[in-house]
Amino acid sequence: MVFCGFDWLITLALFAANIRIMVHQRSIRIVDSHTAGEPTRVVIDGGPKLTGRTAFEKREELRRDHDWLRTCGLSEPRGYEAMVGALLCESDRDDCVAGGVFFNSVGYLNGCIHGTIGLVQTLVHLGIISAGDHGIETPAGRVTAQVDDSGSISVRNVPSYRIAAGVSVSVPDWGTVVGDIAWGGNWFFLVNNTSGFPLHLEHAGRLTQYAIAIRQSLADQGIVGTDSAEIDHVEIFDSPSDPASADSKNFVLCPSNAYDRSPCGTGTSAKLACLFSDGRLHLDQTWRQAGILDTRFYGSVEMANQANDIPPGSIIPTIKGQAFVNGELTLIINSADPFRFGIPYHQASLNQKPST
Ligand code: PYC
């Protein structure tokens, strides 16, 4: 599939006080959506042309050479910390309609299920795909999105698994916290809520502090994922607000220190892997995971085929949710604007600029 090059560059010549000032403008076309409350900002045109072969290579290229796209789209004044961005890419794979590279206000993600649902809803909105099954290539691997006529989108995720159960971590000011380490397309530490604060939006500040303290303690105590990967997401569970409509409620801390407004699809995948390993979830069961806004994802599992790079007993989760497109806009990068690449949090991102 070809996304037509809309890489337009406008040069405006301004003449003031006999001094000729050249102002360069670059435009980036965006579609915004939210999935169960969590925003996804998809770059559909005007981004850098990436030469990497796979979505993984494209992500590394974006990180290395074009980090300005992430900062200009997601940092203030255009974006904010809860927002996840996706660069819509072509995929070299015959079994994929598109690729997506996901990022947030502090860095890059491996996979992102709410973001994949948002990206797929964006492709539907643009008339590029319709109901049916569609392969999407992500840095975490190929996922399949099934678009149904009711507006729901189900994403069959990458193999998910738990690598450790009942891990104790000592968290200053909060005591000892015991949780599981699992992969669902990102690394998660999954704990029951011992913060003393119910999982309600009004306690989001305290819950964020609790989750940040847990994540910091994991790092300080050398508790990591496979290949020493940082555990950058913390998922806290409690009873659902309405047991008739959900099996569990979560609060998920993302790497940007924002909490996921949705139940977090990769986090729900990690949860399903833990439940399955504990014998608390069966192959024909649907798990209803509520998030902090009481919106829900519906998860089911199948056994993963044995492969060398995944632990025995891994599952393939499918996560169902719904996204709504809520904006189409054009970002303007004006060379005269000191905050054209966002208000800088990271100097490194300022050192890589596009040609404007
Ligand atoms: O839905 O997988 C997800 C996700 C990851 C980070 C934010 N949302």
Image (cartoon, rainbow, N blue to C red):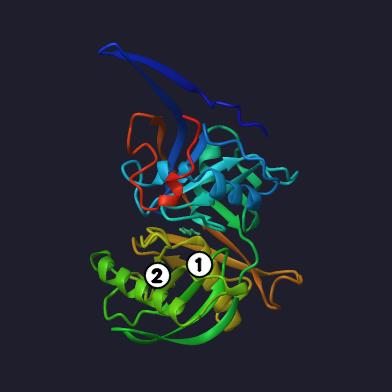
Q: Report if the beta carbon of the residue with label 1 is closer than 8 angstroms to ligand 1.
A: yes
Q: Are marks 2 and 1 in contact (CB under 8 Å)?
A: yes
Image x and y of residue 104, in percent: 44, 53
Horizontally, is 144 left or right of 245 in the view? right
Q: Earlier in the sequence, mark 2 or mark 1?
A: 2
- In the rendered view, does 341 fall on the left or right side of 166? left
Q: Is residue 132 above or below residue 249?
A: above
In the drawing, what numbered circle is on residue 268?
Answer: 1
Q: Position of residue 265 (x, y in %)?
A: 50, 61
Left or right of residue 109, residue 331 in this image: left
In this rendering, does residue 81 appear at all? yes
Numbered label attached to residue 338:
none
> Would you identify the image quadrant in which residue 77 lies?
top left
Q: What residue is drawn where x is 45% and y is 28%?
A: 26
Tell me the amino acid under the disc marked 2.
Asn
> Hey, what amino acid is under mark 1?
Thr
**Where is mark 2, residue-wise?**
250
Q: Secondary structure at mark 2?
A: strand
**Furthest-front residue in view?**
18
Disc 2 versus disc 1: distance between alpha carbons?
9 Å
- Please tell me which residue is depicted at 75% across the width and 69% down the height of the picture: 305
* Badge 1 element: helix
Q: Position of residue 320 (x, y in %)?
A: 53, 57
